[in-house]
Image (tube, rainbow, N blue to C red):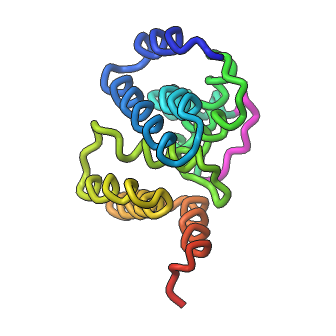
Amino acid sequence: MYNEEYIMNSLELIMPEERFRHSVGVAQTAEKLALKYNADPDKARLAGLLHDVARDFDDNEMLARAKKAELQISEFGFAMPILLHGPIGAIMAGEEFGITDQEILNAIALHTVGSEYMSQLDKILFVADKIEPNRKFKNVDIIRQQVEMDLDLALISCFDESIRYALKIGCLLHPTSIKARNELLRVRGSFRK
């Protein structure tokens, strides 16, 4: 399918050590979650490896690559270019690593802010990114326990953590994340009326 050894070797060369370790942790976690939640473990592992390939670009590089790729950049992308690393990473995964599977590319693109319409693989990568073994934040163990029982519940908790973090540091809340969270609650019927 894809040359995973080449991808691993390339990422190890271009990523800072900590980012590479994180990506390997996400790949392993995504693979386990895929096996648990009936998704393709190979796709999950590849998406995990490549999800942060663009994460270490500075704001100017992020915006330049987004413009070159003719991505539509919202006001949030201009205000917080770091949020563009998902879509840019998906483009890089295709162009530089030969990934043609749209499901993998979509999961990489959506792992930063999510979407109202997330596939199983999208959800798995989003959660794996937050709970991989190297992550340490206040509620990470709670989310790790939740994902053992309910992927969507863990995903809601991941959105909650992202929202709390944005509020804590005083940055903008991306409306796509809010919509994604609200859609999960609506589908589950667990919102308050």
Front residue of 132 and 93: 132
Which residues make up the magenta segment? 67-75
Residue 119 percent across, percent down from the top left: 64, 50
Quarter of the image for the N terminus: give it.
Answer: top right
The residue sitting at 44% across, 28% down in the picture is: 56
Question: Who's the residue at 35% across and 46% down the image?
Answer: 131
- Name the spot of residue 39 as percent of width and height, x first: 58, 42
Q: Check if residue 192 falls in the magenta segment.
A: no
The secondary structure making up most of the magenta span is loop
**Residue 97 placed where, x, y %?**
62, 16
On screen, 186 above or below 31? below
The answer to which quarter of the image holds residue 189 is bottom right
Q: Is residue 17 visible?
A: yes
Residue 142 lies left or right of residue 111; in this view the side is: left
- Of residues 192 and 52, the one nearer the viewer is 192
Residue 129 to residue 21: above or below:
below
Q: What is the quadrant of the C terminus in the image?
A: bottom right
